[in-house]
Image (cartoon, rainbow, N blue to C red):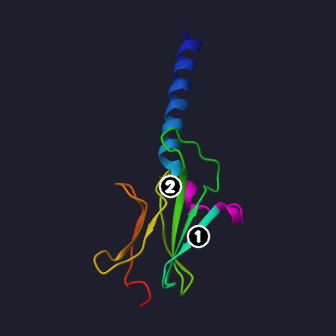
């Protein structure tokens, strides 16, 4: 009876750990720098003010719900400062970058409800 109880307790602990890793991994993995230079696709805005890096996860990451998990990093190209990083997002079929306009003063990568977006203070080229 004690052995059975221990197995059930151990199984419950393992299940809780798996769920916690699944919830925390997308945030943790995207905070790491890419492991090699070939891990990112870089796009620079038409006027050269901003840069977006769409990177493969630096650490091994497995997801049943994401075909192409990626991290997005936003940069001010003039100062080389990072503006922000996204959590893990699925970039399958939606890697287009929408640069700031007068109507939408932000950089948007892809589409959909969970598309990474970074608010910016200046339009491209200003």
Q: Residues within 10 Å of mark 1 (few under 14, many from 20)?
A: few
Q: Secondary structure at mark 2?
A: helix
Residue at 52% over, 23% down: 9
Magenta stretch contains residue 52: no
Quarter-of-image position of residue 121: bottom left
Q: Residue at x 54, y 24 (%)?
A: 11
Depth check, mark 2 against mark 1: the one in front is 1
Q: Vertically, is 123 above or below 104?
A: below
Q: Is residue 38 magenta?
A: yes
- Give me the residue at 48% from left, 40% from top: 65
Q: 13 or 37, which is in the foreground?
A: 37
In the rendered image, which residue does mark 1 sit on?
A: 42
Q: Position of residue 58 (x, y in %)?
A: 64, 57
Precedes in sequence: disc 2 or disc 1: 2
Looking at the rendering, the stretch of residues picked out in magenta corresponds to: 27-39
- Residue highlighted by disc 2: 27
Q: Main secondary structure of the magenta part?
A: helix
Picture coordinates of residue 113 (x, y %)?
A: 34, 54
């Amino acid at each position: 009876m004690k052995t059975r109880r221990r197995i059930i307790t151990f199984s419950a602990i393992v299940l809780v750990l798996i769920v916690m890793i699944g919830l925390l991994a997308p945030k943790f993995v995207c905070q790491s720098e890419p492991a090699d230079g070939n891990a990112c696709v870089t796009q620079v805005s038409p006027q050269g003010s901003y840069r977006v890096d769409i990177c493969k996860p630096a650490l091994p990451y497995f997801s049943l719900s994401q075909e192409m998990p990626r991290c997005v990093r936003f940069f001010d190209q003039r100062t080389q400062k990072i503006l922000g990083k996204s959590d893990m997002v699925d970039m399958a079929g939606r890697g287009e970058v929408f640069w700031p306009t007068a109507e939408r003063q932000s950089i948007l990568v892809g589409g959909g409800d969970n598309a990474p977006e970074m608010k910016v203070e200046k339009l491209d080229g200003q």
